[in-house]
Image: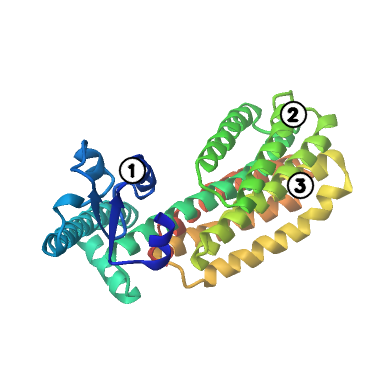
């Protein structure tokens, strides 16, 4: 009977239970509709049901005893069942619409809060902005609000995954810095803070609902982080720097794959700028690390990475300077980053001297702060948020 209703989509169903055991079988069959049948249900039986509440819970709208049935009573029974079913359907539609409005109101309020926080604007202005975006996109206000919050979530996640790239290089640089005897006490504090930051970012990313590719990438990041964290717990020594650097490069590769997977999952072109900007933090740390390793170890691998990293940093900096996704805050931060970049390049070129090493360490930290600010500014950028 249930399969027949699904196949034929009738306007009404008239159930007839005339044999012993049929009522129990029908009650069992009706469980699948969970009290919400797809059309009006009425019941004919030998006598009035012993437990009418059970039939009501199964979605039966009217019933009659076969002994009392005639054409007039049958017509009345069918009209009664249809009327009750229609009223219940209307009530369910009203309830669904109310739930949708309440749900949309929550999304709208959260989206307004995001815009107010990110842009420093009043609630009325944030609402006007959302309404304008909804009209422009021909979408419901709740849909735009939800999409905005999802974009902000993915932007933050890309930022955090990008931080893992940077932290892999910063931690290796801090180990080399300690071996070189540069600001050792401060370096140890930064190493502890950086390791905690890795853990916090991994915990945040663990809380996301990821597709298969991104979830696999996150597993690879964790596998790469474990041996590096073990190496970092040991005292920094010249003989351990090469292996530590290799582990940092493995984490870098895994974090790069994760960031790319998250960017693809976000499916918003404007999020690419967050990734580009975040990658600059990593390049600044990698450049300082490789310059220190080249001067301390005299090995070819870190020296060979210096020029490609410098070229990539310069090219990306030019892209950021020319991107239309900008604001007065962003332009000012990029200009400051340009000045600090020149100081880092000078430190790299003089990494064989004590003053040069100190300069490149300080410039790399200054660039890290600057690009943290810049990445956050892009996250709050109206163009990125509303894309």
Residue 373 visible in rendering: no
Q: CA distance from mark 3 to mark 2?
A: 18 Å
C-alpha gap between disc 2 and disc 1: 66 Å
Q: Quadrant of residue 168?
A: top right
Residue 130, quarter of picture = bottom left
How many numbered marks, from 0 up?
3
Q: Secondary structure at mark 3?
A: helix
Q: Which residue is mark 3?
A: 290
Vertical arrangement, residue 175 with respect to residue 114, above or below: above
Residue 27's disc number: 1
Q: Position of residue 112 (x, y in %)?
A: 27, 56
Gap in Å between the C-alphas at discs 3 and 1?
75 Å
- What residue is at 55 percent from the left and 66 percent from the top? 320
Label 1 element class? helix
Q: Residues within 10 Å of mark 3 (few under 14, many from 20)?
A: many
Tell me the number on the disc at residue 231.
Answer: 2
In the image, residue 339 above or below residue 133: above
Q: Nearer the viewer, residue 223 or 321?
A: 223
Q: Are marks 3 and 1 in contact (CB under 8 Å)?
A: no
Does any portion of residue 200 appear in the rendered image?
Answer: yes
Q: Secondary structure at mark 2?
A: helix
């Amino acid at each position: 009977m249930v399969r027949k209703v699904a196949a034929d989509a009738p306007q009404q169903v008239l159930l007839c239970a005339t044999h012993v055991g049929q009522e129990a079988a029908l009650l069992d069959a009706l469980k699948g509709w969970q009290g919400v049948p797809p059309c009006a249900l009425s019941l004919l039986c030998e006598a009035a049901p012993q437990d009418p509440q059970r039939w009501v819970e199964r979605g039966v709208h009217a019933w009659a005893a076969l002994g009392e049935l005639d054409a007039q009573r049958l017509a009345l029974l069918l009209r009664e069942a249809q009327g009750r079913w229609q009223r219940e359907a209307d009530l369910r539609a009203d309830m669904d619409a109310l739930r949708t409005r309440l749900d949309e109101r929550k999304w709208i309020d959260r989206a307004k809060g995001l815009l107010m926080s990110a842009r420093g604007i009043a609630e009325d202005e944030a609402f006007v902005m959302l309404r304008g975006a909804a009209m422009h996109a021909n979408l419901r206000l709740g849909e735009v609000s939800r999409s905005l919050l999802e974009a902000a979530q993915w932007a933050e996640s890309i930022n955090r995954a990008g931080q893992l790239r940077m932290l892999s290089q910063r931690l290796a640089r801090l180990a080399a810095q300690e071996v070189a005897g540069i600001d050792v006490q401060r370096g140890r504090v930064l190493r502890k803070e950086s390791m905690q930051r890795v853990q916090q970012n991994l915990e945040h990313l663990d809380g996301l609902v990821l597709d298969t590719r991104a979830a696999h990438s996150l597993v690879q990041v964790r596998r790469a982080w474990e041996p590096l964290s073990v190496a970092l717990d040991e005292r920094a020594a010249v003989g351990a720097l090469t292996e530590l650097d290799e582990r940092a490069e493995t984490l870098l590769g895994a974090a790069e794959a994760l960031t790319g997977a998250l960017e693809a999952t976000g499916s918003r072109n404007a999020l690419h700028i967050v990734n580009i900007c975040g990658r600059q933090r990593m390049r600044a740390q990698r450049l300082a690390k490789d310059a220190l390793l080249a001067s301390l170890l005299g090995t070819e691998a870190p020296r060979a990475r210096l020029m490609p990293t410098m070229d990539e940093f310069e090219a990306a900096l030019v892209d950021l300077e020319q991107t239309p996704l900008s604001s007065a805050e962003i332009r000012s931060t990029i200009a400051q980053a340009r000045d600090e970049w020149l100081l880092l390049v000078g430190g790299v070129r003089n990494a064989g001297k004590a003053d040069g090493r100190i300069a490149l360490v300080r410039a790399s930290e200054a660039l890290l702060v600057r690009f943290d600010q810049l990445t956050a500014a892009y996250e709050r950028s109206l163009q990125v948020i509303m894309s």
